[in-house]
Image: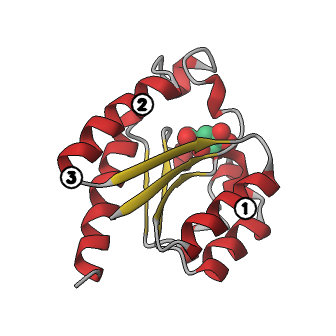
């Protein structure tokens, strides 16, 4: 099983970015923990981050066309990007949407997700644990799909 963990804009700033909302763990900290978890799950992991919408679209296409699962924190593009949604549905990627913060407890513009309808499920509000829970869920879904 192969899973790509795709991170959208500003997540490279984790650790110093609004720590009251996003916590103090860096993306490298999160990646290190995910790699240990992936080893236990026997999942091949690719972790990427980009601040560019088109690049995030390309990452999704690449994963989906390769038959890899997509664990995606699309950050602000969650709420704005039709292109990202079309990349998930168009590439046939099995995707799980995650967020560190509880987007439903925040500004109303964060309540809507354009990608949620084309994802298997959504996990938000658990900080770095959202990544951990998402990886567990996606690995289980993929294991159930592959004979
Ligand atoms: C986020 C929530 C988004 O609304 C925001 O734009 C982000 C991070 C989260 O992980 O909580 O950049 O995706």
The residue labelled by disc 2 is 30
Give the spatial CA distance, label 3 vs label 2: 16 Å
First reached walking from the N terminus: tag 3 or tag 2:
2
In the orientation shown, which residue stands out farthest toward the bottom? 147
Residue 57: image tag? 1
Q: Position of residue 113 (x, y in %)?
A: 63, 62
* Residue 21: x %, y % from top left: 54, 26
Residue drawn at (40%, 49%) of the image: 45
Q: Nearer the viewer, residue 72 or 62?
A: 62
Residue 106 seen in render: no
Q: Earlier in the sequence, mark 1 or mark 3?
A: 3
Asked if the residues shown at circle 1 and circle 2 are in contact, with their CB atoms under 8 angstroms apart, the answer is no
What is the quadrant of residue 2 in the picture? bottom left
Q: CA distance from mark 1 to mark 3?
A: 27 Å
**Ligand 1 sits in which quadrant?**
top right
| Disc 3 target residue | 41
């Amino acid at each position: 099983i192969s899973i790509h963990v795709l991170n959208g804009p500003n997540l490279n700033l984790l650790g110093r970015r609004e720590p009251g909302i996003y916590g103090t763990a860096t993306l490298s900290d999160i990646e290190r923990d995910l790699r240990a978890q992936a080893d236990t799950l026997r999942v091949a992991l690719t972790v990427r981050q980009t601040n560019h919408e088109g690049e995030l679209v390309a990452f999704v296409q690449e994963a989906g066309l390769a038959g890899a699962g997509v664990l995606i924190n699309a950050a602000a593009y969650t709420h704005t990007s039709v292109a990202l949604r079309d990349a998930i549905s168009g590439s046939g990627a099995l995707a799980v949407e995650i967020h560190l913060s509880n987007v439903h407890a925040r500004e109303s513009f964060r309540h809507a997700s354009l990608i949620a309808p084309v994802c298997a499920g959504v996990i938000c509000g658990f900080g770095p644990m959202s990544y951990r829970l998402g990886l567990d869920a996606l690995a289980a879904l993929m294991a159930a799909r592959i004979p």
